[in-house]
Amino acid sequence: MIRMIGVSAILGLVTLGCGSDTPDESSSDEGDASGTSTGGASSSTTGSIEPTSSSTASATTAEEPEPEPACGPPPEGVVVSVMIDGSEPSTLGDMRFDQACEVTEVEDDGAGGYKLGFACTDEMGQPIAHRLALTLEPPGVAPVAVGEAVQLRLHNDNPFYANTFVTLRDPEGALLLAFLAAEAVPDAFTDEYWAEYYPPSDFYAPLVLDRVWLCEATCTSSACPCRERGAIDFMLDGEVARVWEGNRGQFAAVQLELRVYLSSAVDWQICEMPTDTTSTWTTLLVTRQP
């Protein structure tokens, strides 16, 4: 992976989709009993999530699933994005905090997302307010209620664009919300080589994230660069839920919804690779469900 990165890379990831529609316009689709989410060729249901689901080993299917891997273009209609304190993460610069807070606002935005307000105490013991605004499609459910005590943690690294990592936990440390939009997931590699820029690999613990690449890059005569669809393995308490780009999923034993908006790579084999770029990008959201 290339540390030097730039806006051109994000444009490549977001606007080029295996010769098909872009992942910005993607929607979730169904998963199979072995833990694979489809690329839209067939439908099934897992747990209570509709119209899409992901992947758990205990999932059951109502219809014939698409074989793994789901290497077609991601489906249309999925959106996951966040605003922090009223700003795009790319405008925040390098920002880190880990603060005790109380939830002061939970507001439906009328379009499937929600806004969360927090009254927090900063590292100097001074009161400070924070807000998260989640834009979601399909619609989501806020993982907290007004009056709850929470721990809000942000790690935002902004060399050319933002690598953004957010967690929201209850006072016992249980994960209520996890957001990631970055060129890599925190792991042993980032611990060793990117510790200056990335949070530690246990940032989302006990949840563990692993990117999975099972597909070949798909190219057309008009596509530059070529694009590869990926998946995320979410691991928790011995269970693995695989969710393909453009899908939602859940664990069998834990009430967490798993969304993968982007998990893709670009291949510059048929065109010149720009400078200040990255070849991979992932955006995901995990939320506690009522």
Image: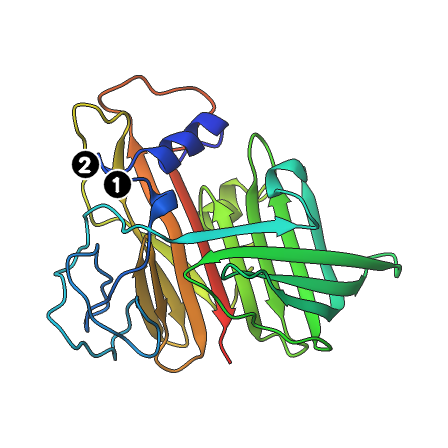
* Image height of 183 relative to 232, above or below: above
Side of 213 where 23 appears, left or right = right
Q: Please name the amino acid that badge 2 sits on.
A: Thr
Say which element carries label 2. Answer: loop
Given residues 112 and 230, the one toward you in this image is 112
Q: Which mark is residue 218?
A: 2
Residue 186 visible here: no
Q: Quadrant of residue 60?
A: bottom left
Say which element carries label 1. Answer: strand
Please name the residue shown 56% across and 47% down the image.
164
Q: Quadrant of residue 142?
A: bottom right
Pointer 1 and pointer 2: residues touching (CB < 8 Å)? yes
Q: Which mark is residue 228?
A: 1
Residue 235 is situated, as x and y percent measured from the top left of the image, at 38, 68
Residue 94 visible here: yes
Q: Please name the amino acid that badge 1 sits on.
A: Glu
Q: Reading the chain from its start, which is encountered first: label 1 or label 2? A: 2
- The quadrant of the image that shows the N terminus is top left
| Mark 1 vs mark 2, CA separation in Å | 6 Å
Residue 209 is situated, as x and y percent measured from the top left of the image, at 41, 59
Given residues 73 and 4, the one toward you in this image is 73
Residue 283 is situated, as x and y percent measured from the top left of the image, at 44, 50
Side of 166 where 275 appears, left or right = left
Please name the residue shown 42% across and 31% down the image.
11
Q: Work out which residue is located at the far top of the displayed protein and give it.
A: 272
